[in-house]
Image (cartoon, rainbow, N blue to C red):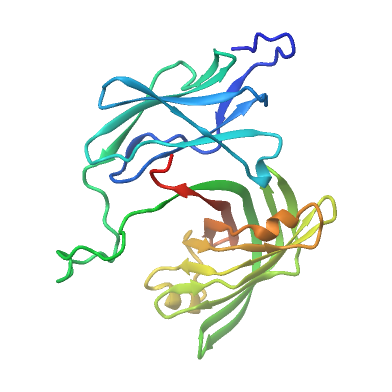
Amino acid sequence: MTDGSALSRQAALLFVRDNLPSGAVPSGTAPLVVVGATPIHPSNAVLVQMRRDGGHTTCLRTVPVGAPFQAAKQWYRAALPTLDAGHRIDYRVELIRAGQRLATLPTDGSWLTVIGDPDPVSLPEERSSPHSAVAPSFPGAPRWNYDLVFFAALTINLRPEILGDTPDGYRISFFVDDGRVVGPRIDAVVRRDGGDWMCIRRDGIGLIDVRITYETADGALILDRAGGFFDLGPDGYAKVAAGQFTGTPPFYATPTFLTAHPDWKWLNRCQGFGIGRVVMEDLRVECDIYIPQVRERRGDG
């Protein structure tokens, strides 16, 4: 649909940064809806029409979201009500301007549905406790809303330098052959002067110690420092020690960034969260980096 004003005839659109919540979600959580609107207009308003368990439709107003890597884009967020097990919420998103509905998600005006999972998955190490019947002194549920914003896809090809079995564990230094980091606001190469000084424990967990440098087209040098772990499996130590580099094991990283370039100093304030896998046969890292942002307390709108 289009804006009918004389000032702009550009098509108005709603779009998502990640997938909108749908299907089963853990009971006791408040699903987060994050959408963008274009073109930017001071009169834009984004509403979430919703109905609980097939009841009357009510309107939930979103709040604007500002982040340094969404400059020149208009983003909005809203937390749906907390879902109890077995209950459902149908919802759709509408872009409103001057009383006119310009766009919807889904685009055909239908509804998305989220349902509280009646049998949420337990944590791997969850066990019963003799004190489990006692009411906790501290809250045991999430307290803060958050956004998890995609920053960039990082791809690096590595070459190994094997130190071998040391008192700390099996040491391998993985140096950068080449790489690239590409996202909504960055397109940079990864310089060859960095790497991951990894130590693999006997239980097959590799402890990540990353120091790599991005070089952007405008000449900025950005240091990415990350810890985390790399899960090679229970027999991972023996396989690596035998020179067997196979599979695509997962890894989890916590990058932080450091730069002196004036156009990139906003990254100095960002804590990243990286997830991905390593194609062991090629020693190629494929990592997606997100920036978490803490929002309002849950239940405060």
* Spot occupied by residue 217 in the image (x, y as percentages of width and height): 82, 50
Q: Spot the residue most to the right.
A: 219
Determine whether 116 is above or below 94 in the image.
below
Q: Residue at x 80, y 52 (%)?
A: 263
Q: Residue at x 43, y 72 (%)?
A: 236
Q: Spot the residue most to the bottom.
A: 167
> How many marks are shown on the rendered structure?
0
- The image quadrant that residue 205 belongs to is bottom left
* Spot occupied by residue 110 in the image (x, y as percentages of width and height): 40, 18
Q: Residue at x 52, y 48 (%)?
A: 148
Determine whether 173 is above or below 270 in the image.
below
Quadrant of the snapshot with the C terminus: top left
- The image quadrant that residue 285 belongs to is bottom right
Q: Residue at x 37, y 42 (%)?
A: 30
- The image quadrant that residue 31 belongs to is top left
Quadrant of the snapshot with the N terminus: top right
* Spot occupied by residue 108 in the image (x, y as percentages of width and height): 46, 15
Determine whether 50 is above or below 156 in the image.
above
Q: Left or right of 140: which side holds 272?
A: right
In front: 106, or 4? 4
Q: Left or right of 250: which side holds 39?
A: right
